Image: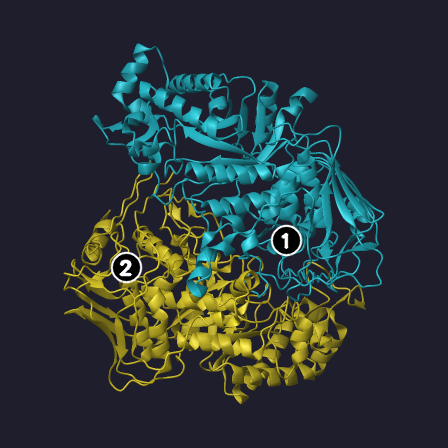
Chain colours: A yellow, B cyan
Amino acid sequence: MKRLIALLEVYAILLNFCVNCEITVIEVKYPLEGQRSPPNAVWPHPQQINASLDLLYIRPHDITIFSNIETCDIIAKAIERYDPLLFPPKLTMHEPPSSADNILQSVSLNIRDGGQCEQYIQPTSNETYTLTISQQIAIVESTTIWGLLRGLETFSQLVYINKDNYVVINSTVNIVDSPRFHHRGIMLDSSRHFLPVPIIKKNLDVMSYNKLNVFHWHLVDDQSFPFESEAFPELSAKGAFSADHVYTPSDVADVIEHARLRGIRVIPEIDTPGHTHSWSKSMPELLTVCWANGRPNQAVYGVQGEMEIFNPSEPRVYTVMERLLREVKEKFPSNYIHLGMDEVYDKCWSSNPNVSAWMQAVNITSTKGLHAYYADRVLNIMRNIDSIPIVWQDVWDEQVELPTGTIIQVWKGGADNSWASYLNNAAKQGYNVILSTPWYLNYISYGKYNTNTSVMNLEFFKYYEIEPLMKFTGTEEEKKRILGGEACIWGEFIDSTNVLTTLWPRASAVAERLWSAATLNNSEDAQFRLDVHRCRLLRRGIPAQPILNGYCGNYELGMAKSMINDPVFNYDESVWVDVIITTAQPSSTKSTTPNIASPIHTFTSVGLFVITELLFLTIIFS
Amino acid sequence: MKRLIALLEVYAILLNFCVNCEITVIEVKYPLEGQRSPPNAVWPHPQQINASLDLLYIRPHDITIFSNIETCDIIAKAIERYDPLLFPPKLTMHEPPSSADNILQSVSLNIRDGGQCEQYIQPTSNETYTLTISQQIAIVESTTIWGLLRGLETFSQLVYINKDNYVVINSTVNIVDSPRFHHRGIMLDSSRHFLPVPIIKKNLDVMSYNKLNVFHWHLVDDQSFPFESEAFPELSAKGAFSADHVYTPSDVADVIEHARLRGIRVIPEIDTPGHTHSWSKSMPELLTVCWANGRPNQAVYGVQGEMEIFNPSEPRVYTVMERLLREVKEKFPSNYIHLGMDEVYDKCWSSNPNVSAWMQAVNITSTKGLHAYYADRVLNIMRNIDSIPIVWQDVWDEQVELPTGTIIQVWKGGADNSWASYLNNAAKQGYNVILSTPWYLNYISYGKYNTNTSVMNLEFFKYYEIEPLMKFTGTEEEKKRILGGEACIWGEFIDSTNVLTTLWPRASAVAERLWSAATLNNSEDAQFRLDVHRCRLLRRGIPAQPILNGYCGNYELGMAKSMINDPVFNYDESVWVDVIITTAQPSSTKSTTPNIASPIHTFTSVGLFVITELLFLTIIFS
C-alpha cells in the first residue's frame, strides 16, 4: 500500500490528463491495484513529464512538421513515416469544429548546439530530447538527430483520437527525457527458422516505437546459414535451408538502411567455434570429426554430433574467418561484430585423436586451452580488421583474455540471479557488459502466475521487475561499463508466424526497463500503460498479443479496420501479389512510402472510414 | 527401441511411398528417433492405409470431381472449396509431360446405401469412408455425406507438388477410415477477448483440415456478453465491450452455416449461474449482491466480487433464462446447449442475508443445495424446450441429479490424472462424458521439455500421449458413453492476434488422438508427420507455428508466396479494404467463393507463379 501511495504521488501529475476518454475497470474477485491509463500514456515512460488537462485539436493529416536541420534524410523520412502513425489509415478523424481556436499549429524538430545529420547512430550517441507544447506549437529539441527521432516518437504517442473522433493532444506539455542505458536491444535468430526481411523490418518498426536502438542479428547457427557471403557463396548455397531462405547482399543492405533511418544499429553475429554445423555443408574440412568406439563419424549422440564444432588445428578455419569477418565488417556499418563463442561442447575435440595429437604437439593441455587458442586467433583477426568484439559470456567464463572494449553478453545465472554478480565482475575487470539472462523471451509461459503475495502477477512482471544494477557494488566508472541489455528470442519454435506476437508487448517491458528511471518499477501500474501501448501497436499494424482481458477497438485483427495487413505498415510483397492475382493491378501500385524531396512536409487531409476509438479497458480476472 | 521397431513395421507400408521428394534430417547432439515423413502424410492418420510407390500426375486446376449425390449443397460447395487446397494459389504447378499417360482422371464421391443430403451433422453421424485409387480413378465412398467430406479431405492431403513442380498422387491407394470418437471439438472463448467472425471461420476451416466436428462456442462470461439476443438486446448492448464487439443474429447464422458446410456442429454455451458479471450491466437484479462487514456491495476482494453470480432466489432469473435458452435453441440447430455451471463461488451467496433468509424459508440448508436448486430449475427449462444439456463437471461433482443424456465435460484432475476416474464414474452413472482436462491449450509452455528419459520431448507430446481410456474399467456400454473430447482455449491472453497460432498445430495433436487408433501413439514418430501437416496448414493460409527447427517452403509468412493473407483463405474484409484504399478497386472483386450451380465441377488451369516445393526437414536440436 505504501508503494501504491508513493506511486499515486508520482503519477498524479502524469495521469490526470485523460480528458474526453473513458476507462472502465471492472474488478471481480481479484481487484487490481494501480492507476488506469489514458490512451496517450507514453511507453517507455519519459524521465520527466508534465502535462495540462486541457487539449488542443489537431487537423487530421494536416499538421506541419518542420525541422531546422535541412536536407537530412533521416529526419525527412521520419516526418513522412509518422503521418500514418499519427493518423492511422482507416480510422475516422474529424476536422476540428469550425469555431475552435485551440488547434495545434505545427511541430518543430529543432537541433541545437550544431548537431549534424549523422548517418548512423553510435554506441554512445546522445538520445536526450525535450518536448514542449505551448501556445499551440510543439517543439522537440535535441543536440542530435537521434534525440529528435525519440522525441518525435513521444510526440506521436501523446496524440490520440478521442471518443468523438477528434484528434487531440494536451495543450501544455513539458518533457525532459533521456535513456537510462545506451544499449537497448533485441536479438533475433534467423538460423533455426528463417525470418523473411519484411518481418525483420516490421520488427525494426516496433523497436523504434519502443525506443530500442540495437538489432542483434544472430545470423547463422547449426541449423542453417542464410547469410549470403560474396567471398564464400557456397556457405549459404549449401548451408541455407533453400535458395529462398537466404539474405542476399541487397537484403542485408535493406535491413541496415531500414534500421539506420530509425536510429537502430545492426550488430551481426557470426557464432563460432560451436554452433557451426551449417558450415559443414560446404566446408566440412573446418569442422572437427567426432569419434566414438575408436572410429570417426561415430559420435555419441546425446553428447556430441558427428561434426558440430570448428577444428582449431585446421589452418583454413582462420583464413576463412579472416575473409568472412572482413566482409561482414564491410557490409555492416556497426564497428562491432558478435563472435558468439558460446556453448563449446568440447567432447568432440577430445574424442578426435588427430586433434589430441596436435594439441600435444603445440603444448595445449586442455580443451579449455584449445578454446582459448581459437579465441585468441579470432580476436587477433578482429584487431587486424579494426572491429570490436562482442561475445557470449562463455569465453570470458573460461578466463580467456579479451581485448579492451570487448562487450560481454551475460546470459547465464538465471536460477539464482547470479547474472548480477557476472555484471559486477565483468565491469570490475574493465569489460563492457550487456544483460540478457532474464530476457530470453522465447521461453513462454501462461500470461499470469501466482506468487506468495499475489494471485494475478502477469508474465511480463518478470521481465519488468528486473533491476540490472540490483546488486551492483562497483565504482561510477565501472557502472558506466554496464551498457544495457537485450531481449533475445531464439528460433527453435519461433518463425514468422509467431515472432512478432511472441515478442510484443513482452519485449516492451524490457524496453521500458532499459530506458526509464530505475524508480519506475511498479508492475501493477505498468500493466495498464502497457495495455494502452499494446493497443497502439495494433493500430500501427503490429499483431501484439493481449496482456490483460479486454479489448482495443474496431481495428483489432480480423475486424474491418484492422491495420495488420495495411500496406503502409508492411513490407511484404505477398499482400500485393494477392492484389495482382485478383485484380490484375499494375505493379506500380506497390510503392507504399513515396520519397519526399523536402524535410518540410505538410500532410493533406484524407478522411476515409468511420471508427469510434473506445478505450474502455474492461479488465476482469476470473 | 522395441517401440521403434514395432512402429517401423506399422509404418513400412505407409511411409515408403515418398518418391521424388527429399527429406533430410540432421542429427546433432540430440538424435531424433522415428521416421521421416513424406509430404503427403495424412493427419489425422487413417485407420488403414496402403499405398503404392508409383505416382500419377494431376493436371493443375483440371481434375473432375463428381458425385452421385446430386443437388447437395454441402458436397457441391466442398468440391468448389477444395480447388485452392489441392492447387494452392501462387504455387507453380506444371502440366504433366505431354508423353505421360499416368494421369489421374477423376475423383468420384459416391454415396452408398441410400445416404441422403443431410443438412446438419449429428452427434452420432457416421463419418466412415473408404478411399481407393486404381486405374487412374479415385473413389471416395461412404453411407453419409459426412464420410464423403472426410474422405475428400484425406484425398486432398495425399496430393502434393513434387520438387519438379508436378502435382502428383500415389497411383494405388486403399484407405478404410473412421473416427475412434464421435465428439472431437475445439472450445473458443469469445468473452474474455472478442474473436471476430472471420477468425472463427478460419478456425472452422482448420478444424475441417483436422477432421474435427464440434465447435463449442463459449459465448459469454464475466468479461463481456457479445451474443446479441433478440429477446434481450440490452444484454449485449450494455454487456459487450463495444457495439463492434458483438455477434449479431446474422453473424451467428454465418458461423453456423460455415460450420454446417464443413460437417461441424456448433454448440453454444450460456454459462450460469457463475461467470455472469457481464449480465449485470443490463440486468443487475439477476445477480447476487455480495456483502461484507455487514454491508452490501462491500465484497471481500480476492474471494468474491460485488456482484458475480446469479441470485437463485430471484424469480426473474428463470424467466430470463427460459426466454434466452429458447432463443438460443432456435438459433443453433444443434440440439445441445452447454449450460456451464462451473466455478460457482458460493461465498457471495452466503454473505447476503436476504439470500440466507430465503434459503431458510424454502428449507435449503447449504449453498451446495442452492446450486442444486438453481440447476434443477434450469434443467427443467431445458426439458421444456427439448434441448439436451452439456455441463462442466462441477455440477455433477456436487451430485446434482442430471437428466439422462446429459453430457458432462471433464476439466479437472490434471495434476494426478484423476480425470480418468471421472470419465469412468460418469459413464458408470449413465452419463455421457467428454474430456478436456489435459487439453487446455491456453496453458502454453516452451516448445520442448526434459523428462527422465529424454531431453527433447516436444510440448505437443503432452497432448498427444493422452489416452482417454487409460484407466477405463467399465462395460462396452459404458465405454460408448465416453464420447470424445475437446481442446479448449480460454481467452484471458488469447485474441485474434494469437488464437490461430497458439491453437495450431497443437490442437492437431488432440485431433489425431480422438480420430486415430489408440495404438498409434508414438510421439517421436508423429512429430515428423505433424511437421508436414503444419506446412500444409501454412499452404492453406493458416499461421500455424513451428514445432521443430527447419522450414516449409517459400510460402512461409512474410515470403512472396505466403498464403496467410490470400483472399481465398480469408473472410476478413480488412484485406479488401486495403485494396480499395490503394487502388480504388470496385467492391465486386470481393467475392472469393462463387456459387456453383452443379455438383459436378471441372477446374480450369491457371498457372501463375513459380515455386519449388522443398521439404527438406532440417532438424537440429542444439
Quadrant in the picture for residue A283: bottom right
- Circles 1 and 2 on the same subunit: no
Quadrant in the picture for residue B436: top right
Label disc, if present, on residue B204 of the rendered structure: none
Q: Position of residue A533 (x, y in %)?
A: 34, 57
Q: Label 1 to label 2, Cα distance in Å? A: 42 Å
Marks 1,2: beta carbons within 8 A: no
Q: Position of residue A609 (x, y in %)?
A: 35, 56
Q: Taking the image as drawn, is residue A392 in sight?
A: no
In the displayed image of the protein, which residue is found farthest to the bottom?
A384
Which of the two marks, 1 or 2, is nearer to us in this view?
1
Q: Find disc 2 in the rendering and name its residue.
A: A160
Q: Residues within 10 Å of mark 2 (few under 14, many from 20)?
A: many
Note whether A79 is above or below A34 in the view shown: below
Q: Find disc 1 in the rendering and name its residue.
A: B84
Note whether A460 is above or below A595 in the view shown: above
Residue situated in front as seen by the camera: A405 or A253: A253
For the point 54% across and 22% down, the residue is B406
Q: Chain of mark 1?
A: B
> Which amino acid, mark 1?
Pro
Quadrant in the picture for residue A134: bottom left
Note whether A425 is above or below B230 in the view shown: below
Q: Chain of mark 2?
A: A
Quarter of the picture holding the C terminus of chain A: top left
Q: Position of residue A455 (x, y in %)?
A: 38, 42
Q: Residues within 10 Å of mark 1 (few under 14, many from 20)?
A: some
> Which amino acid, mark 2?
Tyr
